[in-house]
Image (cartoon, helix red, strand yellow):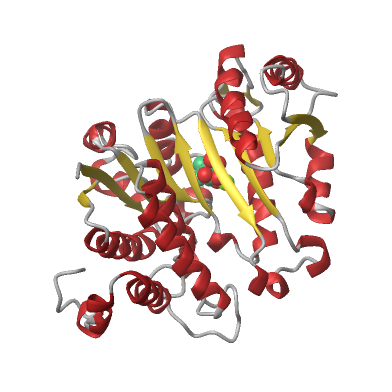
Amino acid sequence: MKTHKIAVLSGDGIGPEIILESVKILKVVEQVFNYSFVFEEGLIGAIAIDETGNPLPESTLQLCKDADAVLFGSIGDPKYDNDPNAKVRPEQGLLKLRKELGLFANIRPIKAYESLLGKSPLKKSHIEGTDMVIFRELINGIYFGEKFTADDYSYAYDTCTYKKEDIEQITHLAFQEALKRRKKVTLVDKANVLDTSRLWRKVAMEISKQYPDVELDFLFVDNAAMQLIINPKQFDVILTENMFGDIISDEGSVIGGSIGLLPSSSVGTENALFEPIHGSYPQAKGKGIANPMASILSAAMMLRYLGLEEGAKAIEDAVENAINNLIVTSDLDETSDYSTSVVAHYVIKILLSEHDQQSYINLENILIGKSTII
Ligand code: IPM
Ligand code: MG
């Protein structure tokens, strides 16, 4: 079995807490399915600024380039959010990493878990059966265009640019995914106003000819924002540009009941990174209340990307079991006092009970670290 090198970037806020649990679970899966992982940690974000002055130190970038996959926690710190003058910001580390690794497609699945239907602020009848995946372009558009702020702060601008080839590569991925699903791609744009959106439409229409079995339709982003709330079941694959994807994926997270549930993968031709869609949630840092599921499910997506399907499925099934039995953190059930690690340990317990009876019997020792499995 090939040894997979995994770069672990915990980042800021709740990042280290959730990554700790995901790595524990990956080590269990490693043993149960005879995989072989090497984990190497790197600094990124506010903590990297504190320690090195750079939100993405060269050593971290190199570590990620050399790794088979990157497991990422979260990034951001209020001391920067509240300071518009800060020239060096934690987010720059993540954006540069995405760009340098060429991670052009950010894939964000959103589904309504049956047992959590009542937890969403949206009506159960609206969200039941929702199962969609957002393909967000990640390394172009307004995030990466020319930007400027006048010295006297009298004006500023950001520009949005897309090249045909930037749109083509993610559009192909979205259509290929649709072929495996319900065969529908919805392009979300603002083609009634923006030139870049009209280019997206043109390119998507051309490419759709190569996928005659997939239906392509279009929605303006303002309408899409509304449709996501009133009729999310209509969506299968959503394809969209960088900033619209950022916004509608946070919006979509309310369907599942909590943003703390949503994983994502970011893929390029050479590299891939796996991260929750939520941010660093600094208010929860160190309190043991962060929902570890988005990170654990991101680890499962990573295994699938590495071709380790059995492990990926085992994690997803165990997470689903935890959710069905409401072994969840308080963001999903206000009466719950299950901590981050209690929820993760339950996932480990279920995984072992299904796949490794011997270790399951030894579970207590494993969880307190007396056994080699963790
Ligand atoms: C996300 C985040 C990032 C983004 C931030 C942290 C730069 O919101 O991954 O969705 O805007 O892409
Ligand atoms: Mg976001």
For the residue pair 350 and 143, the one nearer the viewer reads as 350
Of the 4 image quadrants, the one containing the C terminus is: bottom left
Q: Is residue 45 left or right of residue 36?
A: right
Q: Is residue 223 left or right of residue 144?
A: right
Give the residue at x 62% y 18%. Answer: 161
Q: Position of residue 314 (x, y in %)?
A: 40, 62
Q: Is residue 214 left or right of residue 104?
A: right
Q: Position of residue 79 (x, y in %)?
A: 45, 53
Q: Quadrant of residue 172?
A: top right
Of the 4 image quadrants, the one containing the N terminus is: top left
Q: Is residue 213 above or below residue 198?
A: below
Give the residue at x 70% y 42%. Answer: 182
For the residue pair 72 and 205, the one nearer the viewer reads as 205
Q: Is residue 84 above or below residue 351?
A: above
For the residue pair 86 and 255, the one nearer the viewer reads as 255
* Residue 7 seen from this side: yes
Q: Is residue 184 above or below residue 326?
A: above
Give the residue at x 27% y 36%. Answer: 57
Q: Quadrant of residue 205?
A: top right
* Residue 86 seen from this side: no
Q: Quadrant of residue 256?
A: bottom right
Q: Position of residue 333 (x, y in %)?
A: 60, 79
Q: Position of residue 188 (x, y in %)?
A: 74, 33
Q: Is residue 275 above or below residue 146?
A: below
Q: Is residue 343 left or right of residue 3?
A: right
Give the residue at x 64% y 47%. Answer: 249
